Amino acid sequence: MITLDTKAYLLRMFVGNFFFFLLFYMTNTDLNKRKYLFVCLLIPLTFFVELFTDVSAAIPIIGSYFILKEKKKTNIVLLNKLLLCMLIDDFRSIITSMVMTYMFSFEGIKGYGYVVFQIMLDSLFLLMFIWLYRKLAINRIVEQSSSKLTAIFMIYLLTIGLFVSYVAHQYQVFDHFVFGVLIFLIIQMFVVLFLFIRITIRQREQYEQQLKRKELVYLKKYTDSLEKDQEKFARFRHDYKNLLLSLKEIANQNHDSILEKEIKELEIYSNSYLTNKFEYRYLKNIKNEYRSEERRVGKEC
């Protein structure tokens, strides 16, 4: 196991806490600057808690979330961004530790030179991630796919990572098995990703089925409305034609040619507007099709 000088170890610990807040700020440039100043106050708090406990990783996430979110509102996107940054920060720590174990021997006590070199590796790793984050528009992807499910999966990965790292440090085998720890976490990440994709596809299918059912319900309401309007229109047209016939009979009985001519002109004029543009007898077939489709969708669900 690599042994560090106490002061050098404290320096690495403090800078390691600073990296998380820097990473979160650089990947979320739309942050409220005023609120983020209060978030930065969590850096020394996290540092002091880390000196005595192994649960300090929760402080930046929980503290930043409640400081940055709006009052009395849940912001699942913000929570997912914080969890993602913490995951990346953990991977940063594991990867640079693995590199350092292959570059330095386990003999002697390592001082500031060792720590400064590791901090440089950390900085390089974070700069590469920030570049990829912006290049691939990961921020937009996180905003579109954020949900309680993604938060649960990332919390699971963080918990597993912290637990494995804690056990490895307790038994003083972390430096020897850091590569195995990294592989284990990567496997866990792919398992979680696989489960997330499957659940997301299933939820999307259910959503599409619900949307289809709603569309069918709206179609039925629309066809019902058309049927009622057509029935009213048919009754009106029937009464109107009866009225014209009555007027024709009156004109014939009275031998009023002028009235007959006006009635005929009115009949020609009204026929162009009182035509049945919708074949009413076919509207009932739409309702029948809906019922058969509704039964089919119900069976699928």
Image (cartoon, grey):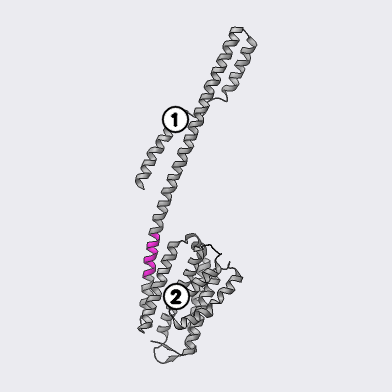
**Crowd around label 1: few <14 · some 14–19 · many ≥20 (10 Å):** few
SS of the residue at dot 2? helix
Residue depicted at 50% across the width and 78% down the height: 46
Alpha carbons under labels 1 and 2: distance apart: 66 Å
* Majority secondary structure of magenta residues: helix
Q: Depth check: give the residue in front, 191 or 209.
A: 209
In magenta stretch: residue 67: no
Which residue range is magenta in the image? 187-197
- Residue 119 appears in the rendering: no
The image shows residue 39 at horizontal and vertical percentages of: 55, 73
Q: Which of marks 2 and 1 precedes in the sequence?
A: 2
Disc 1 target residue: 282
The image shows residue 88 at horizontal and vertical percentages of: 46, 72
Q: Is residue 196 above or below residue 265?
A: below
Q: Residue furthest bottom?
A: 108
Q: Which mark is residue 90?
A: 2
Q: Is residue 127 above or below residue 114?
A: above
Q: Depth check: give the residue in front, 76 or 107.
A: 76
The image shows residue 13 at horizontal and vertical percentages of: 48, 82
The image shows residue 212 at horizontal and vertical percentages of: 43, 46
